[in-house]
Image (spheres, rainbow, N blue to C red):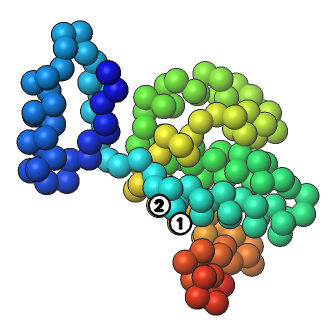
């Protein structure tokens, strides 16, 4: 039996969760997490940005841009908010030199594990980093109205 993800935003969802709990068979595992997972819009936007960065940098693929930003911007966020993630992955990347870490970070699941606030922090970090380099990352909502920022 598969159960839905329930986001508790008011008492109605809390009551619904209580009703479902009463119907669960023995030995059912329930997981709770604080904070909402990154949004689809955030995910689409950062992947668009990785492509934009790759096109602007010319010597970097979108996957390499993603790995670099995960390592330079995402890792400090995870260190500050997700000690359990660091505990799991640090033994793999910790002893590696920077170049090998970059390659590994193409595959380590990080941004998909982020919550909305963490992803916002990651995206703000990317915007700041590339603005300092002279690249304005495109806001897809502004783009559909003819703007570029």
Q: Is residue 57 above or below residue 142?
A: above
Work out which residue is located at the far top of the displayed protein and give it.
27
Q: Which residue is mark 1?
A: 124
The quadrant in which residue 97 appears is top right
The quadrant in which residue 104 appears is top right
SS class, disc 2: helix
Work out which residue is located at the far bottom of the displayed protein and give it.
146
Residue 98 visible, this orientation: no
Q: Tell me which residue sits at (69%, 70%) in the image.
A: 130
Q: Is residue 20 above or below residue 138?
A: above
Q: Which residue is mark 2?
A: 120
| Mark 1 Cα shell of 10 Å, populated few (<14), some (14-19), many (≥20) | few
**Nearest to the observer: residue 93 or residue 112:** 112
Q: Tell me which residue sits at (52%, 24%) in the image.
A: 88
Q: Are circles 1 and 2 on residues that touch, CB within 8 Å?
A: yes
| Mark 2 Cα shell of 10 Å, populated few (<14), some (14-19), many (≥20) | some
Q: CA distance from mark 1 to mark 2?
A: 6 Å
**Nearest to the observer: residue 29 or residue 58:** 29
Place of residue 3 in the rendered image (x, y in percent of width and height, measured from the top left): 30, 30
Q: Tell me which residue sits at (49%, 25%) in the image.
A: 87
Numbered mark located on residue 7 in the image? none
Q: Give left or right: position of 57 versus 35.
A: right
Q: Is residue 121 above or below residue 26?
A: below
Residue 106 visible, this orientation: yes
Q: Quadrant of the N terminus?
A: top left
Place of residue 137 in the rendered image (x, y in percent of width and height, measured from the top left): 66, 73
Place of residue 114 in the rendered image (x, y in percent of width and height, measured from the top left): 47, 45
Q: Tell me which residue sits at (66%, 57%) in the image.
A: 47
Place of residue 105 in the rendered image (x, y in percent of width and height, measured from the top left): 69, 38
Q: Give left or right: position of 113 versus 62.
A: left
How many discs appear?
Answer: 2
Q: Quadrant of the C terminus?
A: bottom right
């Amino acid at each position: 039996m598969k159960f839905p993800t329930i986001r508790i935003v008011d008492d109605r969802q809390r009551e619904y969760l209580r009703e479902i709990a009463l119907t669960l068979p023995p030995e059912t595992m329930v997981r709770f997490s604080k904070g909402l997972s990154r949004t689809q819009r955030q995910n689409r936007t950062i992947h668009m940005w990785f492509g934009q960065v790759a096109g602007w940098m010319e010597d970097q693929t979108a996957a390499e841009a993603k790995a670099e930003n995960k390592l330079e911007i995402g890792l400090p966020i995870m260190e500050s908010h997700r000690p359990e993630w660091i505990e799991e992955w640090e033994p793999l990347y910790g002893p590696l030199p920077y170049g090998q870490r970059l390659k590994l970070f193409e595959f380590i699941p990080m941004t998909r594990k982020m919550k909305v606030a963490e992803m916002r922090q990651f995206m703000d970090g990317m915007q700041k980093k590339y603005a300092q380099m002279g690249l304005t990352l495109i806001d897809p909502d502004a783009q559909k109205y003819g703007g570029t920022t």
